[in-house]
Every structure is written in structure tokens, then in C-alpha cells.
Image: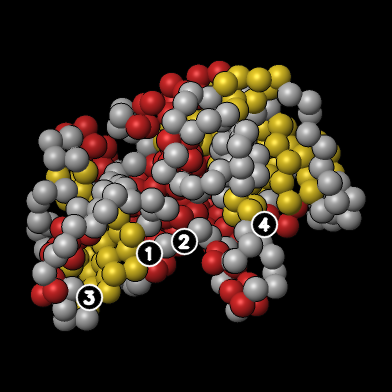
Amino acid sequence: MRAMVLEQTGRPLVMKELPDPLPGPGEIRVRVAACGVCRTDLHVVDGDLPHPSLPLIPGHEIVGHVDMIGAGVTGFRMGERVGIPWLGHTCGACDYCRAGRENLCDHPLFTGYTRNGGYATHAVADASYAFPLGGLGEDGAVAPLLCAGLIGWRSLVLAGEGKVLGIYGFGAAGHIVLQVARAQGRKVFTFSRPGDGEAEAFARRLGADWAGGSDEMPPEALDAAIIYAPVGSLVPAALRATRKGGRVVCAGIHMSDIPSFPYRILWEERQLLSVANLTRQDARDFLRVAGEAGIRTTTTLYPLARANEALDDLRAGRLQGAAVLIP
């Protein structure tokens, strides 16, 4: 198989010819049709996340077709289209797993971080953590749903049922969550880099009720805010924009340091929460909602060999929506 391999963090990926992987017991192998390029991949490649399993094939927004089935696997058929997300395996035995909180498992494996991912022509996955996709949409359009969509969904659920929602950082996750929130009848205000008129126009085209810079206050107080940009200074900004009793949800896996802020902007029962990973039930719930709501992703497609270019474009903020690799 061909794969883009991370040999050392902080260095570009290297294209390699590798032996085709074989699925073990309980695993499936897929022929990759598309793999989204997620900001978490950027954090892995740049070394923001500790201890990746090097050498590593990144990528955890995988859409592929089953082409080999390991011993003991049931429920999948050859050629079936499936999605493979970030959560690659959990122990099932720790306190968190037994309590139904497998996203906090003490001994997890993560696709494209601690097990090989989808920047390749083939990928192997634990069959229990892969999801049938049916006719949800075209491969490249569906790929971002496998993380930007799933983490977006989990963050939206944690944000609660408030009717006025703020989205800070309008990229892959933000442009998906905006559509879900609008389908739920919520009012949505989006915040992007100050002066980024293209991002503001993009948000308005997708139905944002207001779009402005992250240095602005919204036209009315927020019931909840979700922060997707990995920028710690947005936390006090979002708290200031949120009404009494509201929530601010930090949805990224990595964020720059949060500056000190006065207690008065947290007081009055505002809540500050973080999102960690996802559960398989999150995936089942969101993939159903995505189909019902007719979510449309905006993507830029790159051939596999241009994975470094896709990462650079994401790093520099040159993308609208999501980047997707097509092997």
C-alpha cells in the first residue's frame, strides 16, 4: 500500500510503499476512499500532542470499503462502506468504560495517533469502532463528519438546549455544527479571525444569523458558546458574551494557554466545560442526525501525495470548511 508517514514530529510526512496491513481478530481492513484532514492531525504532526506511536500514518476521518475481515467479526460484509473515527479502541474494563463514559477510557487507542490511520490506500480498524455509512453522501463529503462532525455534535450536546448559540472558530466543525443548530431551530452567531470577511460571508451563506470577528460582542447575549479554534484567549471572550447561567464549551483536543480573567465573568453560574474524544453512541446519534438534517460539508480535495500541502493550508487558515485526501 501507499501511505503518508510521520517519522518525526515537526517534520513533513513522507510517502512510502508499505506491505498491505492484515486485520487481526476482531478487525477489518478497508480500502480508503477518502480521509479528512483534521486540526487534530495538525496537532499530532506538529508535536502538540505527546507520545504519538511513531512511525505513524495519521488520519482519523476515514471513509472506506471493507476488503478483508478478521476472525470473529460479524455485522460487516465485503465491499460495505464504513467510517472510522478518532476513537479506535477502549478497554471496556476501567471505571469510565463501565460507567458508559468510554470517551474517557484509561487505556484507549486513537486512530491516526496511537494506531495507524487513513492517510493511506488501506487502513485496519477494530470492527467494534467502525460505522456503516450506507448512502449518507459522497465519500469526500462524508469524511469530515467522522471527527469535525462527531466532536461538533458532542460539543453541541454539552452546550445544552439554549436557543442562542455562539461558534468561535468557523472551520470544519463550525460549519457542520451551524447547520445542525439551525435545523434544531436555534439562532447562531459565528466568530472568526478579526477582519476575515471570507469566513464571515461563508457563515452567512450557511445560515448564520450574525457573523463577526472574535474581538466583537454579539448582538445579544449567548445561551452557550462553543470554541473550536485552539486559542486560549477566546475563553474569556466567550464568557463575556455569555448570559448568566450559560455555558462555554472548549471543543478542541489542544489549546494555547488560557489567560487569567476576572472571576466576575465566570460568576452567576456560568459553566466552563471541555470535550474529550467521543463515544460510539455519539457516532450513531450524529450519523442519524446528519442524514435527517441533510448536512452538506464544504471540502477541498487533495490527492494523497499532497497531504503536506493540505496540512499547510489548514495551518495557515487558507481553507473554507475541510480538507480531504483522496488516495
Asked whether disc 2 touches disc 3, contact meaning CB atoms under 8 Å apart, the reply is no
Q: Secondary structure at mark 1?
A: strand
Q: Is residue 70 left or right of residue 257?
A: right
In whole angstroms, how far apart are the C-alphas of marks 1 and 2? 7 Å
Q: Is residue 22 left or right of residue 205?
A: right
Q: Secondary structure at mark 3?
A: loop
Residue at the far bottom: name it.
268
Which amino acid lies under the numbered mark 2 shown in the image of this protein? Ala
Residue for point 79% across, 49% down: 27
Which amino acid lies under the numbered mark 1 shown in the image of this protein? Ser
| Screen quadrant of the N terminus | top right
| Res 249 label | none
Asked whether disc 1 touches disc 2, contact meaning CB atoms under 8 Å apart, the reply is yes
Which amino acid lies under the numbered mark 3 shown in the image of this protein? Arg
From this view, report whether residue 219 is shown above or below residue 76. Answer: below
Tell us which disc is closer to us: 3 or 4.
4
From this view, report whether residue 198 is shown above or below residue 287. Answer: above
Nearer to me, 63 or 268: 268
Residue linked to disc 4? 89
| Res 274 label | 1
Q: Position of residue 170 (x, y in %)?
A: 29, 44
Residue for point 71% across, 19% down: 17
In whole angstroms, how far apart are the C-alphas of marks 1 and 3? 14 Å
| Screen quadrant of the C terminus | top right
Residue linked to disc 3? 270
Image colouring: secondary structure
Q: Position of residue 228 (x, y in %)?
A: 33, 51
From this view, report whether residue 22 is shown above or below residue 97. Answer: above
Label 4 crowd bin: few (<14), some (14–19), many (20+), radius 10 Å: many
Q: Secondary structure at mark 2?
A: loop
Residue for point 18% across, 65% down: 239
Q: Is residue 208 left or right of residue 74?
A: left
